Image (cartoon, rainbow, N blue to C red):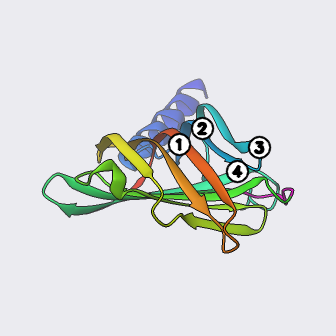
Amino acid sequence: MIRRTLLVSLFASLLLVACGGDHGLTARGSVTADADGRSTGFAFPDDTRLDVAGDGAAGLVTGECEMAKVGEDAWGLVVTIRRGATVDDLGLSSVTIMQRTDADPSAGRVEAELGTTLYSPAAGATCQVDVPYAVDDGGMVGLTGDCAVQDVDGNTATVSVELDLVGCTVID
């Protein structure tokens, strides 16, 4: 009986390895938005899982990350992180970060939702998103930077990003 249990466990382990051992998207770091003298955002201790299906409705933070090949050794990156529960009027509800690994940091773009209000890149304002690394094996991406964003009424916020992601979807 013990031998059969060990064989079943070994087979299951081999099956997981053969299927890539997908552990989902995980994040470490933070995203903060400073608006109207308040700071709000997401803080991720080591290896916080973001892609648990259905958890958004339960109030958990979910997310997606895609790396698409855009040239020789270059990747286009799109990362979206969402809070599932209703937040107050100024709480960070979601953020989307876009950048290419072959682009200048000033080409980065950040959009954020504070409460239910969308903030987009502010005209003429600075946005710097650096990609310290992007490795297709394992879908590993690092993002750092600060971007000024504003809503349609001209209210401004600064979004700061310091993230390490593992498990991004890789699109060749």
- Residue position marked by numbered label 1 in the rendering: 161
- Main secondary structure along the magenta-highlighted residues: loop
The local secondary structure at tag 3 comes to: loop
Residue reaching furthest top? 2
Give the residue type that dot 3 points to: Gly
Give the residue type that dot 1 points to: Val
Q: Which residues are magenta?
A: 83-88
How far is mark 3 from mark 2, CA to CA? Answer: 18 Å
How far is mark 4 from mark 2, CA to CA? Answer: 12 Å
* Residue 48 sits above or below residue 68 on the image: above
Q: What residue is at 29 percent from the left and 43 percent from the top?
A: 135
Question: Disc 1 or 2, which lies upstream in sequence?
Answer: 2
How far is mark 3 from mark 4, CA to CA? Answer: 24 Å
Quadrant in the rendering for residue 39: top right
Image quarter where the C terminus lies is: bottom left
* Number of residues whose C-alpha sits closer than 10 Å to that of mark 1, classed few (under 14), some (14–19) or many (20 or more): many
* Residue 48 sits above or below residue 62 on the image: above
The local secondary structure at tag 4 comes to: strand
Q: Nearer the viewer, mark 4 or mark 1?
A: 1
